[in-house]
Image (tube, rainbow, N blue to C red):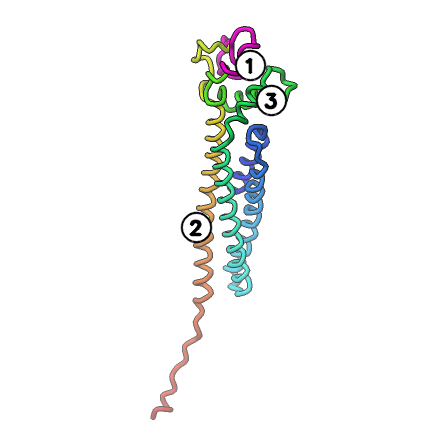
Amino acid sequence: MVPSLGGLFFLFIYRSYRHFIGNDDLLLPASLCFVVAGLLVLTGIVGLCAAVSQSHCQQGAFLYLVLILFSLEVTTGTLGYINSVRVESADLNSFNEIFRNYNGNDSMIDSRAVDQLQEKMQCCGVRNYTDWAQFPWFFQSGNASVPHSCCARNLTSCTGDLEEPELLYTQGCLLTLQDELRWIFLFTLGWIIAVFCLQSLGALVICLWTNSDPAPYQLLNTDNFS
């Protein structure tokens, strides 16, 4: 289901780039996405049964579950928005510190995290590829170059030379990661709005169905007026 996909996206991004995100709160909206997905299935089953059997008890249970879903969806959307704002206002110094610790050794957590981020996100540096000129690796590399993880994948002649930007990923990793998280937030917000509309329609139908059983008409006995 769509909510489950939103949760999977959250978990994938957190697992891949948690070293840069540093925000465990991102796991909460991901978990709520799975809860909403499960509750949606249950609500759908109860709503279907209520429509078929026209049971007032099942109709009441359906409306109760819809209210719970409304609350969870609003909470999930709010938390997703809050986390996206936190990432967008991420501490630039924290990013700089991780990149500053880069030494090209995959056994080092910071180095491995930087290479993984640059390769998967196809980015280079914090704000752009020229940031590497201010980090120790640029001078320690021996040829004043950026890491090979900055090189475009389809180019084998890349040496990491800043004078050949056409061979490098030029966009900064901070902005790229922010864009990725922003896309996930918009995706999650989109399905929340869609499900909210469907639930509102379902609740309206149930309410109309419940009130569409008027008391049977009775013929007026006119003998009483004769």
Q: Residues within 10 Å of mark 3 (few under 14, many from 20)?
A: many
Bounds of the magenta segment: 133-159
Image depth: mark 2 or mark 1 in front: 1
Is residue 152 within the magenta segment?
Answer: yes
Q: Residue 197 carries which label?
A: 2
Taking the view exactly as shown, the residue that stands out farthest to the right is 107
Give the residue number, with chain letter if any, for mark 3. Answer: 110
Q: Distance between the residues labelled 3 and 2?
A: 44 Å
Residue 153 visible in the picture: no
Specify whether 18 is left or right of 74. right
Q: How far apart are marks 1 and 3 (CA)?
A: 13 Å
Residue 14 visible in the picture: yes
Q: Residue 154: x percent and y percent?
A: 49, 14
Picture quadrant where residue 94 is located: top right
State the residue at coordinates (46%, 55%): 202
Cβ–Cβ below 8 Å for labels 3 and 2? no
Q: Residue 125: x percent and y percent?
A: 50, 20
- From this view, report whether residue 87 is shown above or below residue 205: above
